[in-house]
Amino acid sequence: MALETMKGVNEINGEKVIHMYKNLDHWNIFVDHDKNEISFRIQNGPIKEVGKNGCQVEDMIAVAKHIVEQLNAKFPCRENAMIITKLDEAIMWSKKRTADRQARNVEGKSEA
């Protein structure tokens, strides 16, 4: 049921979502409806140093949030709403971390 919420979704959080075995040379989020699986290619190394080659943890959180939102639309409950709120909070903290790293001019670099 949860994976069905991904049908027809072509992009999440700016990341392309692939649904078939075609064009597997460039994907970061892959949905295999036949196997009921989602795979993520995780960024390997800082983007400014190695280029973009995968998705970020924030993108995985965005996928989870999308799935819960779609399930909550069909089966609304307080618990689902709390999950969505906490996932929003996780995304907010991730964006804050990125903003802080940008302000210190270390975003995308192998520096603390």
Image: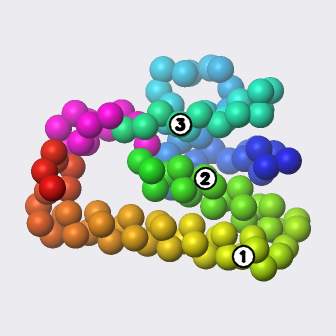
Q: Magenta includes 33?
A: no
Q: Quadrant of the C terminus?
A: bottom left
Report the number of numbered marks: 3
> Neighbour class for label 3 at 10 Å: few (<14), some, many (≥20)?
some
Q: Is residue 22 left or right of residue 95?
A: right
Q: Nearer the viewer, residue 6 or 101?
A: 101
Q: Which label is found at residue 81?
A: 1
The answer to the question of whether label 3 and label 1 lie on touching residues, with beta carbons closer than 8 A, is no
Q: Residue at x 78, y 79 (%)?
A: 78
Mark toward the start of the polypeptide (3 vs 2): 3
The range drawn in magenta is 44-55
The answer to the question of whether label 3 and label 2 lie on touching residues, with beta carbons closer than 8 A, is yes
Residue 42 at x, y percent in the picture = 43, 37
Q: Residue at x 80, y 26 (%)?
A: 34
Q: Nearer the viewer, residue 8 or 43?
A: 43
92, above or below 40, in the image: below
Q: Secondary structure at mark 1?
A: helix
Q: Nearer the viewer, residue 78 or 24?
A: 78
Residue 14 in view (yes/no): no
Identify residue type, mark 3: Phe
Q: Which residue is mark 2?
A: 63
Q: Nearer the viewer, mark 1 or mark 2?
A: 1
Q: Which residue is mark 3?
A: 40
State the CA–CA distance, disc 3 to disc 2.
10 Å
> Neighbour class for label 2 at 10 Å: few (<14), some, many (≥20)?
some
Location of residue 21 (image quadrant): top right
